[in-house]
Amino acid sequence: MECCNGDMGMKICSLFSGSSGNAIFVAAEKTKLLVEAGLSGKKIAEALCSIGESLSEISAILVSHEHIDHIKGAGVLSRKYNLPIYATAGTWEAMEMMIGPVRECNKKIFSSYAPFEIGDITVTPFPIPHDANEPVGYSFSSAGKKVTIATDIGHISMDLLRNFEDSDLLLLESNHDLEMLRMGPYPWPLKQRIAGRHGHLSNVDAGKVVAYMAERGTKKFLLGHLSKQNNFPELAYQTVCSVLHEKCVNLGPDIMLDVASRDGVSRIIEI
């Protein structure tokens, strides 16, 4: 596990990233957040402990949408640690019965277009194209730095790209290789769903976004939410690198590209 040195405005670490479960640690100087809680409370606690963090210091859980790989541990953690859960009204409606009882004071509902504050972090949600009930991605800003998390996105639009603007780090979905998906074992309707406009982003499309954002000043990229059946880390990385090469964008000391692990903690990145 590697840590990038320098003055810290924000810190991010992917604890788990994939269809088996998602959880991301985001921190500023005074505030620590858990984005997604798609695994058991025990696994999330162990992952945080492995990077020197504790659930007792987390200020809130933020959920992007109601699919089980994003909410599995949310209710348990809220009850055990008295944590607020932030989600849109649509996500709350869809997930409330799935996560069990949560104290009314910990049910935090926001508009998918309105920024809000948690401690010294400004959270800016934005709508994403996914087959869920009012799903969102998130940007987090503090001390002049911006981290954006966008997974479970079926296609890229100019609205999404505008929300990515000025990000110092972008954690972006690179879910599948189209040929692996086409030739793989999934039934045809599921293949259509994954490749559809409200499904998941392919490696090639992720590469196009990375190139576009790199040309506009974003320096750090983390590829996430890789499919277990239809992708693997080396393929996602090399595909994105190939697209960058075609666009004449060079990796090096100025631009970082990494892949978030499906099953464990990725490196801590400070910006």
Image: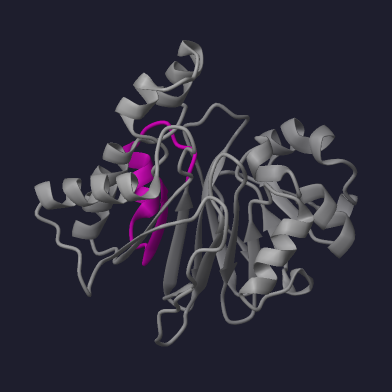
Is 253 within the magenta?
Answer: no
From the viewer's perspective, tell me whether residue 249 is left or right of residue 145: left
- Screen quadrant of the C terminus: bottom left
Q: Quadrant of residue 269?
A: bottom left
In the figure, 67 relative to 244: above or below? above
Q: Nearer the viewer, residue 144 or 77?
A: 77
- Asked if residue 163 lies in the magenta stretch, the reply is yes
Front-lying residue, 168 or 266: 266
Q: Residue at x 34, y 49 (%)?
A: 162
Would residue 81 appear left or right of 150 to someone viewing this image? right
Residue 33: x percent and y percent?
65, 65
Asked if residue 197 shows in the view, the reply is no
Q: Position of residue 99 (x, y in %)?
A: 81, 41
Q: Residue at x 90, y 51 (%)?
A: 103
Tell how many labels: 0
| Residue at x-position 20% and y-position 64% | 251
Q: Provide residue 237's location: percent of width, then percent of height.
A: 30, 51
Residue at image coords 40%, 50%: 163
Which segment is the magenta one? 151-173
Q: Is residue 227 left or right of residue 245?
A: right
The scheme the figure's colours follow is one colour
Examine the rendering and report whether any part of residue 3 can be seen. Answer: yes
List x then y, in percent, for residue 78.
82, 56
